[in-house]
Amino acid sequence: MAWYAELKRRKWYCINGIDMIQLYKRKLYDDWYNSLTDEQKQRLEEYRKAKAEKRKHDAEIALARIRMMFNAMNQATHGRMGDYMESARLMNKIILPSKY
């Protein structure tokens, strides 16, 4: 552990192009995973699968909400949202000029 702390402090973790911190973390994870029983490994896999499904479900809900917002804006602008967005971009350029 002192070796890991010293590498992190000095940022000398890339030795010959190999990220030693990542290698060390991988070794710790492999040691931990190998110490699990088969039942624990199965529960971990189920947990990961449930987490991935939840992430996918949340992404689908977010996309559905974005589509609903786009449709509402499109109806409010009578199908000319692109024109309004271009006008808003031009106004932003006028109001907030770039420093570069």
Image (cartoon, rainbow, N blue to C red):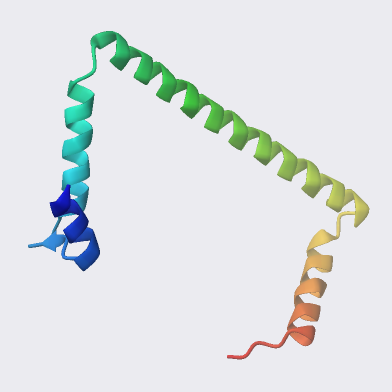
Q: Residue furthest front?
A: 2
Which residue is pictured at 31% across the width and 14% down the height?
40
Residue 76, compared with residue 59, is above or below; it is: below
Q: Nearer the viewer, residue 36 or 1?
A: 1
In this rendering, position of residue 62 left or right of residue 79? left
Which residue is pictured at 81% across the width and 79% down the height?
91
Residue 72, compared with residue 88, is above or below; it is: above
Q: Residue 100 lies in what quarter of the image?
A: bottom right
Percent across and percent down for residue 52 are: 47, 28
Q: Nearer the viewer, residue 20 or 60?
A: 20
Q: Nearer the viewer, residue 69 or 75?
A: 69
Residue 98, compared with residue 5, is above or below; it is: below
Percent across and percent down for residue 14 are: 15, 62
In this rendering, position of residue 41 left or right of residue 14? right
In this rendering, position of residue 5 left or right of residue 97? left
Which residue is pictured at 76% across the width and 78% down the height?
92
In this rendering, position of residue 22 left or right of residue 69? left
Q: Residue furthest left?
A: 16
Which residue is pictured at 85% across the width and 52% down the height?
73
Residue 77, compared with residue 86, is above or below; it is: above
Percent across and percent down for residue 18 are: 13, 56
